[in-house]
């Protein structure tokens, strides 16, 4: 069934979009990530203009994060204080990101900018995650038991001023690192159309020393608001949110997420992390290849509006 | 008023028909004069047909009658960018701005264009796509500006936006003609100008112009207008939809587990 998307101004197969949403939902349910980093490149691939893909991707992440955070709330896995601080940084980062995105669109470099961000961040995070999870996987095999992890590491992060008590996380640290992490994630959300969970989760564990129990819930809580803000910002500044496209992605995504979550429960945490890191690396590689291989068409055309 | 303008335009167009061809004129029709982009829009095929009206028998001393039909979508300025390898990766590093290029352009003819149309009349009436694109002064913007124009033509031809349909106009007994023009699914809204030309001896002897209105309708119209006119409301509605879907999924999941 062909469906004409009113904002992207292309005609797509509705089942293809539902399927795409479903596959990404399946993976995000299995790994506990928003899936924005998969949705946005896949949308580029089927011909959705980059600006529309990024803005609509953000809208889709809102839905999957709400679905996820409700489950975490029941497990008391959300630190609202930490979420609030991350959010404050996130809003600032997102506003800067939307502004940079507009500048890059004008300069005709938005594709390159988005692609480079993907290669850089996904490649880096994927490689770190792969290395870490492979090591703990091997260790758990050798020792036959769970790896020993220090729950609280003192580092330079804990020496900064303006300290605040985060009860649910059991932390007493400066608000500066969470603010900066929030801002970085908000910036990425705006330019990459992602939630940023794949950056925030490791940052919370390794930089802030938050307990794993509250990490996913808090990250999802913050992501809801940052991506919601990003969606509205893109809708207002460049009218690039395609409601119909988002709705199809969301419908496919929520169904896929339920199935994915059930499959995910059957796998071990280390196996999941290795699979996720391989997936992240594969996406980064795929985009890197596009940048390195000689394109079949050197010219591109961007229609302007009549003055 | 609109009708009066249309009549005047037709009169003006019939004007340059030339003395020899004044007795052959076009009577034309189209299968539809509006195209609605609705949710299930997947391109549209327009039948353009017509007849040659004459008071006297066709002149025997002149070349055969030929017909050219053009369909032109709304024009916008476009930026053409070229990629080049910089530090190992491919980036856009040169661009030119073309003043005006149509978003869609199809030329259907009864025969090969260079056999039925002279360069002077092509220039005068702006029939082939090269004559329709306005690119004044791009030579100042970049060296080899012509390559950017070729790039533009190639990209849009590959997208199905620019089409040359040589020999696709059927002409019967130098009187009746018809052609089908396929409008692609990636259509831009606006007025599509249909021009019909009669030619003899590579010269235009009569022409006529029609308009097809392409508009988003129904849900598409509503969503597009809302996004343009009430962007804040639109953004908030998108969020509410996303929130409802996310909450609904969570609730359904809980029910399914219980």
Image (tube, coloured by chain):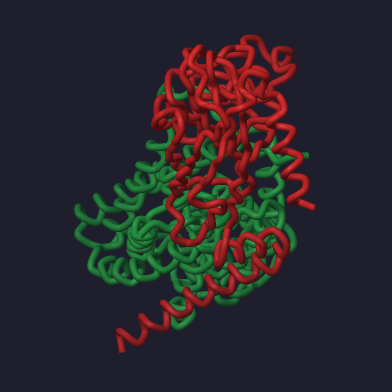
Q: Residue B187: x and y, percent?
A: 53, 46
Q: Is residue A245 visible?
A: yes
Q: Is residue A291 visible?
A: no
The residue sitting at the front extreme is: B56
Q: Residue A145: x and y, percent?
A: 23, 62
Judging depth in this view, the residue of B11 and A75 nearest the camera is B11
- In the image, what residue occupies the spot 29% across and 70% down? A259
- In the image, what residue occupies the spot 42% across and 43% down? A45
In the picture, the quarter occupied by the C terminus of chain A is top right
The colour with which the image depicts chain B is red
- In the image, what residue occupies the spot 40% across and 25% down? B167
Among the chains pictured, the one given green colouring is A
Residue B36 horizontal side relative to residue A30, left or right: right
Q: Residue A231: x and y, percent?
A: 62, 60
Q: Can you tell which quarter of the image residue A166 is in?
A: bottom right
- In the image, what residue occupies the spot 26% across and 53% down? A137
Q: Can you tell which quarter of the image residue B211 is in?
A: top right
Residue B240 horizontal side relative to residue B231, left or right: left
Q: Is B75 above or below relative to B1?
A: above
Judging depth in this view, the residue of A259 and B192 nearest the camera is B192
Judging depth in this view, the residue of A170 and A102 nearest the camera is A102
The residue sitting at the bottom extreme is: B258
């Amino acid at each position: 069934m062909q469906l004409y998307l009113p904002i992207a101004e292309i005609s797509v197969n509705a089942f293809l979009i539902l399927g795409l949403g479903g596959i990404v939902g399946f993976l995000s349910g299995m790994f506990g990530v928003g899936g924005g980093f998969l949705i946005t490149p896949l949308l580029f691939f089927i011909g959705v203009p980059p600006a529309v893909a990024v803005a609509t991707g953000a809208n889709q992440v809102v839905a999957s994060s709400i679905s996820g955070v409700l489950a975490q709330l029941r497990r008391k896995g959300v630190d609202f204080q930490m979420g609030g601080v991350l959010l404050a940084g996130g809003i600032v980062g997102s506003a800067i990101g939307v502004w940079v995105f507009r500048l890059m669109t004008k300069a005709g470099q938005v594709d390159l900018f988005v692609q480079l961000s993907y290669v850089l961040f996904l490649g880096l995070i994927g490689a770190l995650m792969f290395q870490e999870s492979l090591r703990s996987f091997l260790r758990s095999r050798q020792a036959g038991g769970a790896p020993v992890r220090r729950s609280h590491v003192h580092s330079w992060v804990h020496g900064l001023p303006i300290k605040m008590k985060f009860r649910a996380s059991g932390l007493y640290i400066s608000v500066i690192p969470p603010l900066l992490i929030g801002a970085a994630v908000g910036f990425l959300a705006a330019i990459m159309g992602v939630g940023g969970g794949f950056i925030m989760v490791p940052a919370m564990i390794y930089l802030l020393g938050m307990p794993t129990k509250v990490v996913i819930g808090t990250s999802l809580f913050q992501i809801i608001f940052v991506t919601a803000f990003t969606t509205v910002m893109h809708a207002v500044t460049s009218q690039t949110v395609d409601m119909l496209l988002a709705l199809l992605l969301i419908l496919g995504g929520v169904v896929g997420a339920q199935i994915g979550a059930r499959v995910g429960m059957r796998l071990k945490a280390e196996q999941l992390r290795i699979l996720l890191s391989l997936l992240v690396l594969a996406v980064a590689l795929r985009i890197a290849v596009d940048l390195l291989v000689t394109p079949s068409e050197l010219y591109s055309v961007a229609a302007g509006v009549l003055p | 008023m609109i009708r009066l303008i249309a009549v005047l335009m037709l009169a003006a167009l019939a004007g340059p028909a030339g003395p020899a061809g004044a007795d052959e004129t076009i009577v034309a029709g189209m299968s539809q004069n509006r195209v609605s982009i609705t949710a299930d829009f997947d391109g549209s095929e327009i039948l353009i047909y017509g007849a040659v009206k004459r008071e006297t028998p066709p002149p025997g001393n002149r070349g055969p009658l030929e017909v050219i039909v053009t369909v032109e979508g709304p024009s916008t300025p476009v930026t053409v960018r070229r990629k080049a390898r910089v530090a190992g990766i491919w980036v856009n590093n040169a661009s030119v701005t073309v003043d005006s290029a149509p978003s869609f352009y199809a030329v259907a003819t009864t025969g090969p264009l260079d056999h039925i149309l002279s360069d002077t009349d092509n220039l005068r009436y702006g029939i082939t796509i090269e004559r329709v694109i306005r690119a004044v002064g791009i030579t100042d913007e970049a060296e080899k500006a012509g390559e950017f124009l070729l790039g533009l033509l190639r990209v849009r031809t590959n997208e199905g936006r620019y089409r040359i349909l040589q020999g696709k106009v059927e002409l019967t007994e130098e009187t009746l003609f018809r052609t089908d023009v396929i409008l692609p699914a990636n259509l831009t809204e606006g007025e599509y100008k249909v021009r019909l030309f009669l030619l003899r001896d590579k010269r235009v002897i009569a022409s006529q112009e029609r308009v097809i209105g392409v508009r988003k309708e129904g849900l598409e119209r509503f969503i597009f207008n809302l996004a343009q006119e009430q962007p804040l409301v639109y953004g908030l509605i998108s969020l509410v939809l996303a929130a409802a879907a996310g909450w609904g999924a969570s609730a359904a999941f809980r029910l399914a587990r219980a």
